[in-house]
Image (spheres, rainbow, N blue to C red):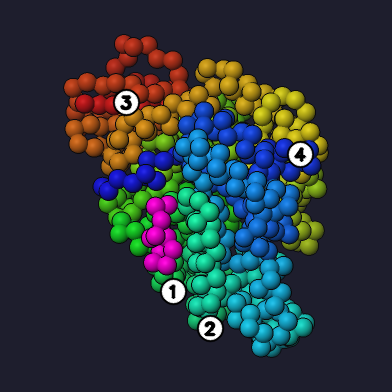
């Protein structure tokens, strides 16, 4: 296994709008982030991934970029950004920027030019098509509901937008577009950026002819024609040759719908494309046949199967990214733990899970203090475009039961992760002196960083220890993974092996006591407890134990 700094790193994701507001306008900003760098240094993280801070009209909270080489006014200026990276580097932390190049904003200069006329030099920067029989060019739906095409009267054609209609897709078939993107990436790398998280990067290649999804429906999901498309690896290899290979950086691609076979191409050991990708398979375990909003209970057996598959099928071929929540997913303690009765121990257990697999762990802001999902009373309290569109389609237009739809929002909405960071028990959780852009979760009185830092047994200090253990024990980074007791309905247990050492991880994913018997084939002479989320008496043997609710233990076996 080739050693790399990005395999040994722990990444912390900041959603700038919700992290810390320095000027009282209710919106987090770059100076706010700078004011909290010592907090992040104290936690022990190595890399900060910054969700987009570029110029944007904010239709999709910054993922609609109007200028790739400037900073959003609400967040500050380029000189604020220069100060941020300098102060991060001074503290030994690296900066990973969000790269959003499947689409731009419709307010980007390229698109403003592109829609002027069919013979404009920028026309071919985007994907334009004439209508078919008075309808859209094909029947694809966008990720945010509705058609993936928007009619433009000026030239009597439609442009493709896989996301919002204010996010037209770039035409990667055009070599000029690719060169513009590579030049922009190089500009940021020359400014000192240490890597990129690439937004929906596996959507950049579409199937020739853009065929309609089969089945004859007016609108249907066409993912097979734009996810992991025919030229995506060619484009990423070109990006790697032209830009990435010239720098020692971290790269992770967001890959919805990517299989382990695809992932082994994107995140291959030869490093011809990316370092790793984000898989979504474990994020779909609680989605029913109707998709994300058709919420069903997830099963531990399925989680074991999916995680083990990614661990084993990338072993020796590629590298995993490890996450249980981010800005697009609900809070992990609410989803996979118990945020009511066992919030602290289940948050620690899930953290143990995340940090003891093979791969690079990603912490999402607030996870380290056990922030939870939120339940706003009214749809008007939510901000996210995806939620608003879905609610309109299902309730206002479709006549579905509003309470049922709200229950799905409480469980799966992206705004669960976007409520402001909870710094202390003062008004608006210390996030802003103004009115926050999105309401603070009312539980900030009990859950905040000030309380966490005062309590030696807090989730924060448990995470700090997990991060430290990764730096002290190579086996946690590089050891191979093997599932044990696969059929246990409450316990997820596995070993990691490196040379003569073995790591044993035992996790109770339930709110009941769970008996555990060590399989006989695991032989060792001595054992050392590295971390646990409950107090243990020293005499306890590990070959046959009963784990308490959400208990986690990690042993080093020799």
Crowd rating for badge 3 (residues with CA inside 10 Å; few <14, some 14–19, many 20+): some
| Residue 555: image tag | 3
Determine the image quadrant of residue 357.
Answer: top left
Spatial CA span between label 1 and label 3: 45 Å
Image position, residue 150 (x, y; %) = 71, 75
Residue drawn at x 33%, y 46% as measured from the top left: 4
**As drawn, is 470 to the left or to the right of 280?**
left
Provide the residue span drawn in magenta.
240-249
Spatial CA span between label 2 and label 4: 50 Å
Image position, residue 373 (x, y; %) = 64, 38
Look at the numbered disc 4 and give the secondary structure of its residue. loop
The answer to whether residue 232 is above or below residue 97 is below
Residue drawn at x 62%, y 26% as measured from the top left: 449
In this figure, which residue is indicated by the disc labeled 2? 209
- The answer to which of marks 2 and 4 sits earlier in the sequence is 4
Spatial CA span between label 1 and label 2: 14 Å
In this figure, which residue is indicated by the disc labeled 4? 23
- The answer to which of marks 4 and 1 sits earlier in the sequence is 4
In this figure, which residue is indicated by the disc labeled 1? 231
Q: Is residue 244 magenta?
A: yes
């Amino acid at each position: 296994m080739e050693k790399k700094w990005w395999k040994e790193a722990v990444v912390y994701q900041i959603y700038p709008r919700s992290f810390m507001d320095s000027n009282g306008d209710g919106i987090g900003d770059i100076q706010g982030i700078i004011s909290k760098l010592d907090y992040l240094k104290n936690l022990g993280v190595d890399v900060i991934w910054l969700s987009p801070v570029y110029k944007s009209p904010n239709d999709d909270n910054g993922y609609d970029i109007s200028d790739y080489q400037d900073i959003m006014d609400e967040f500050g200026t380029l000189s604020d950004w220069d100060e941020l990276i300098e102060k991060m580097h001074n503290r030994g932390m690296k900066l990973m920027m969000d790269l959003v190049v499947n689409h731009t904003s419709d307010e980007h200069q390229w698109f403003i030019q592109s829609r002027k006329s069919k013979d404009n030099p920028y026309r071919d920067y985007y994907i334009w098509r004439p209508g078919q029989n008075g309808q859209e060019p094909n029947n694809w739906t966008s990720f945010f509901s509705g058609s993936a095409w928007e009619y433009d009267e000026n030239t009597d054609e439609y442009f493709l937008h896989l996301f919002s209609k204010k996010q037209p897709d770039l035409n990667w078939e055009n070599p000029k577009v690719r060169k513009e993107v590579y030049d922009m990436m190089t500009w940021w790398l020359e400014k000192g950026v240490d890597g990129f998280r690439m937004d929906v990067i596996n959507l950049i290649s579409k199937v020739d002819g853009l065929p309609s999804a089969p089945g004859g429906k007016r609108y249907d999901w066409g993912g097979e024609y734009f996810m992991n498309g025919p030229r995506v690896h060619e484009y990423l290899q070109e990006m790697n040759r032209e830009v990435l290979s010239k720098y020692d950086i971290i790269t992770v691609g967001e890959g919805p719908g990517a299989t382990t076979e695809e992932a082994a191409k994107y995140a291959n050991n030869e490093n011809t494309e990316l370092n790793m990708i984000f898989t979504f398979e474990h994020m779909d375990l609680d989605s029913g046949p109707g998709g994300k909003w058709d919420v069903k209970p997830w099963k531990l057996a399925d989680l074991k199967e999916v995680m083990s598959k990614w661990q084993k099928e990338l072993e020796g071929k590629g590298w995993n990214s490890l996450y249980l929540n981010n800005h697009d997913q609900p809070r992990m303690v609410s989803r996979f733990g118990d945020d009511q009765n066992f919030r602290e121990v289940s948050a620690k257990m899930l953290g143990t899970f995340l940090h003891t697999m093979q791969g690079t762990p990603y912490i999402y802001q607030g996870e380290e203090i056990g922030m939870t999902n939120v339940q706003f009373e009214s749809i008007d309290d939510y901000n996210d475009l995806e939620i608003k569109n879905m609610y309109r389609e299902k309730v206002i237009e479709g006549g579905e039961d509003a309470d049922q739809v709200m229950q799905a929002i409480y469980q799966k909405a992206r705004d669960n992760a976007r409520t402001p960071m909870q710094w202390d028990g003062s008004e608006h959780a210390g996030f802003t002196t103004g009115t926050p852009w999105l309401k603070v979760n009312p539980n900030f009185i009990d859950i905040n960083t000030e309380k966490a830092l005062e309590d030696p047994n807090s989730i924060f200090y448990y995470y700090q220890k997990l991060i430290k253990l990764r730096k002290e024990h190579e086996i946690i980074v590089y050891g191979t993974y093997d599932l044990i007791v696969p059929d246990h309905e409450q316990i997820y247990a596995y070993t990691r092996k490196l040379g003569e050492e073995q790591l044993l991880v035992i996790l109770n994913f339930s709110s009941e006591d769970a008996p555990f018997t060590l399989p006989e084939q695991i032989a060792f002479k001595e054992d050392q407890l590295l971390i646990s989320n409950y107090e243990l008496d020293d005499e306890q043997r590990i070959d046959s134990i009963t784990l308490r609710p959400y208990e986690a233990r990690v042993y080093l076996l020799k």
